[in-house]
Structure formats: C-alpha cells, structure tokens
Amino acid sequence: MTFPRDARPVPVPGRGPAAGPAPVPPVTAPVPIAALPPRRQPTPPVDARPGLSDDPDWYRTAVFYEVIVRAFSDSDGSGTGDLRGLIDRLDYLQWLGIDALWLPPFYPSPLRDGGYDVSDYTAIAPQYGSTTDFAELVTEAHARGMRVVIDLVMNHTSDQHPWFQASRADPEGPYGDFYVWSDDDTRYQDARIIFVDTETSNWTFDPVRRQFFWHRFFSHQPDLNFENPRVADAMLDVARFWLQMGVDGFRLDAVPYLYEAEGTNCENLPQTHEFLRRVRRMVDTEFPGRILLAEANQWPRDVVDYFGTEDDPECHMCFHFPVMPRIFYAIRDQRANQILEILADTPDIPPGAQWSTFLRNHDELTLEMVSTEERASMYGWYAPDPRMRANVGIRRRLAPLLDNSRKEVELAHALLLSLPGSPCLYYGDEIGMGDNIWLPDRDAVRTPMQWTPDRNAGFSTADPGKVYLPLVQSLVHHYGYVNVEAQLEQSTSLLHWVHGMLKVRRRHKAFGTGDFVALECDNESILGFLRRTDTETILCVANLSATARSASVHVPGHAGATLTDVFGGARFPAVDDDERVVMTWGSRDFYWLVVEDPSV
C-alpha cells in the first residue's frame, strides 16, 4: 500500500505503528435547523379581536370546527401536532369564520382508540403540551371570539387508567367497584354489540381479578360503574376541573350507555337522564354560559329526551345523526324525500335547545340510522373498496366521498349550513383534503393538516418519517396542490367559497334560530324549505339532481313576496298570487333567498 507523503503513518517510539491521521471534520457540517430560514406559512387576513359575545344562546347560531390537536400543526418539530401549534393557527380559524372549536381527547392515553381510551382525565398528554399551553389556547381563542369545547368521555376509560388498575388489583379497595364486574358473562344479554367487526361480546375476562368486566366499545375500554355514587361525583369533579380552566362546554361522548339494567338494551335508561340533569344543574349554577352537547347515535324520538324539558333541562345540544347519511343518500338518489321524511319525524325540542349537525360523525359516515337496503346502496355508491368501511359506516373524507366533485361538495355544505342545527365542520374539509385508505382504522382520515406545498405540507419541520402519519400523496389530493396556502391565493378556491358561505350564514340568524318549514315542490329532485324568525324569512331551494331542473315551489302565506339572493342581492321572480314561484336550477344548484312580503 502506498500513501501520499503527508498521510503516511508515522511510528511512535514504544507504541508500535501509528494509528493514522486524526479524522477531519467534513467541510459541510450539519446545519442546525434554527439556522434555516423560517418555514413559509400561509398568512390569512388578520381580523380584529372582538372577544366573546355575552349571548347566552351563542351555540344556537355557532359554526363548530373539529380540530384534532395531533393532526393540526406541530410547533416543535416532534412530528406530532400540539397545543402551541394550534394557537399559532387561530388567526386562520378566525378568518375562516369559526365560532367554536371542538377538541377531541388530548388526555394521556395509550391511543388505541384515537384518545377516547383515557388514562388520566385531568392531565394533558405530554406530546401535546401542558396545562399552561391549554390555558393560553383558551385565552387566545376567546380573544378572537371563538369558544372551546372539549370531549368528556364519561362512559369508559382505558384499561391503563389508575382507577381500573386499582380496581382489578384490589376488589375490596376504594376503587373495587368503580367498574362493572361479574363472575360470568351472562348478564345484560339484550344489549347490542356496537363494534361488530372487532368485538364478539360486551364482556371480557380479566386474568388479574379473575372476573369479567363490562364494556360497550373496545375490550380495552372498561365501562365505569355509575351506580357507584363516587364515580358520579368523580366525573363531576373532572368537569369542574376543565370548566375552571375556561372551556366553554363538553361534547359528552357515548352518553346513552352510562347505566345498565337487566331486561333492557342498556341504552337511554332513566338513571342516565337523572345523572345528566344533575350535571346540567351543576353547569348552570357554577358555570353559566357553558354548554353540554350529547353524542347519542339514536333515532330523534329517543335523542330528544337528552334535551330534557324547559323546567328540568339536560343537554343544550344533541347531535342529529340520521340527517347525515340522508344528505349523502339524497345526492346519489337525486330525490329530496329522504331528507324531508327524517326531518318530519324529528320531534320539537325545548326552547333554547339546538341540534348539532355534520357531514360525518367527525371521521366516519355512520350508517347505523339507515335501513339494510339503504346501507347496501350507500356502500355501493361511496365505499366500493372494503378498506373504505369501518364498523357500520364509511371511513372517508368529504371530497373523496363525492369523487372530488366541486358542485356536490358545495351542495353538501349548503345543506349542512341551512338545515336546522348548528353545523360542525371537520378539519381540512374546507380545502377538500383527501384520505389514505391504506392506513389502518380511522387513521385514514386523521392525516396531518395540509398548510403549504413544502415538506410535510407545512405541518411539521420533522423528518418526514417521524411525522405521526404520512401525508396524503394521492394523484387527486396530493398536498402539493391541495393546501391552505395555494387556496388562499386563488379567489375561486373551495377555501374562499367556504369562508364566504360562513360569512353569509353569520349575517342571517334565521339559519340558527329560525323555524324549519318544508315546502311542496312539483319536482322530486328539488328540496325546498323556509328558515323563519319573527324578523326574517329565508327561502332555501336546492336541486339534488345531476342535471338541470325546473320546478314550481309553493310558498304558503307569501303571495306577492319579493325574493332576493343573499349572496349577490339579485332579484328573483316574485311569488305569484297563488303562492307559487317557478324556478330553474343547474346541476346541483341551490339558492338562498330573502323573502319580503309586500306589506313590509
């Protein structure tokens, strides 16, 4: 072997041959991330900070926005979204027109069910931040006129929760009866299994305690025993903890299943309603202006009980599950009857109460509230690949569900924003984000928010392999062109359209507090209805067909009324003396028209 003269080993007396020259540092050492220029981020227009309104009925006109903390914005390069990242994006949400944020669980959790397997009710998972960060989030959101609603998972915990670990280890101890235990698995046989694709029983044997524990969901989520007064008291203390932190309300997860009784299906039991009335009294007395939103995937005639009565109220709001699948069914069926029938079957609700509506049960198009035949049709229309299905539903985002049809996406939003109830949007739907059906379970629709066309879509500065889930890179929905920055620069983008729709909706309180009056049309593809208050009447008409339609709409009590478009102020033909108006719609078109009677 030969060496260059300046690199030849030099013997050292007494030490044998020289080991060679010392390593020379590379000329280009790794550049610290801090030395790089700041990552480019979209800059929405910055609005004034109005603070919170003092309207006690704020939730009846609000637009909610579900934002998964892990998925929205990573502030520290860890690859996981966090509370500080969400704080940094509040200006965007304010500009978009959001009135309230809904945060799914951010508690410590094994994350076997997206955080709904809680292992500590009064802490924040360290990857998301601290209670100080959360307090700042609430303060900053309130300054921008937005409220914060969080999930309260009362029905069950993770099997890693200290309560359960103590209960299984010491049956006679203070937590021994915090859960529902049994020597066999024969009790409550009339209760249905909810997750039929993963669970075969509502009972699971625990090898430590040598008994079975009850669970309505996954077998790693034991149900709490609300027959034990200490459990009910503990849950009220959990609610107080977060209300004192400043939250504006709770989405009460899985409330129909809190209690069990032999000979029943263990749903909607009187004890459940009694407990909810107790929670409501505590909230109204100690924290007025905060709300309770019940998640009860039931028929409206059952859900309406969760509002309570005017004299003895329970929840301020309840989700209206059956409306959601019928919007999608009507778009493919091209007929309005499905939507009209479910609204006709919806009972009246107490004064001051409100429905909450959505286009998916935060990340799933749930199909429990449709018939077997309708479910089969919807699987064929919207989930041709079995990977798109989950439990009794479809795990897809809005844009892919509708084949990225801009007209259908707009129609779905228009129905959501005009039908009775306060709408809830899902993060990323405002830009038409796609999904990744190759990821397991609901991760398919929980991918990172797409902010820019840069690395990791501007979500994180982490190595791409470190991001908690891969970015959507499909041909149609690649983050390189489906992102906030690109759509902010394009005035005709879906993002600007949604922003404009929310701005218009906010101007017309009838969409939130107005009565719903279905109208008779002579074309089955046309859905027509009024939203009406004492001071305003709005005519909403939509063409559910893929082709142009013309129809006569009966507008009772408004003969001679003028019709004015809420978006551009254009005048439409007046209602004739027979209380009818003839209109024409293009494919998937809709109109929102202010009705002004001649006397006015």
Image (spheres, rainbow, N blue to C red):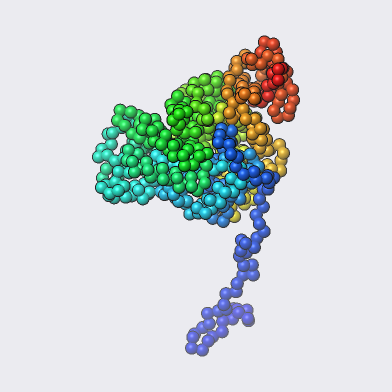
The residue under the point 55% across, 79% down is 20
For the C terminus, give its image quadrant. top right
Q: Is residue 571 left or right of residue 415?
A: right
The residue under the point 52% across, 30% down is 352
Point out residue 580 in the picture as x, y percentages from the top left corner: 67, 14
Point out residue 26 in the picture as x, y percentages from the top left corner: 61, 70
Point out residue 456 in the picture as x, y percentages from the top left corner: 60, 50
- Quarter holding residue 254: top left
Q: Is residue 252 left or right of residue 508?
A: left
Residue furthest out toward the top? 578
Point out residue 120 in the picture as x, y percentages from the top left corner: 42, 49
For the N terminus, give its image quadrant. bottom right
The residue under the point 54% across, 23% down is 339
The residue under the point 32% across, 38% down is 227
Q: Nearer the viewer, residue 60 or 83?
A: 60
Image: 159 above or below 27: above
- Quarter holding residue 236: top left
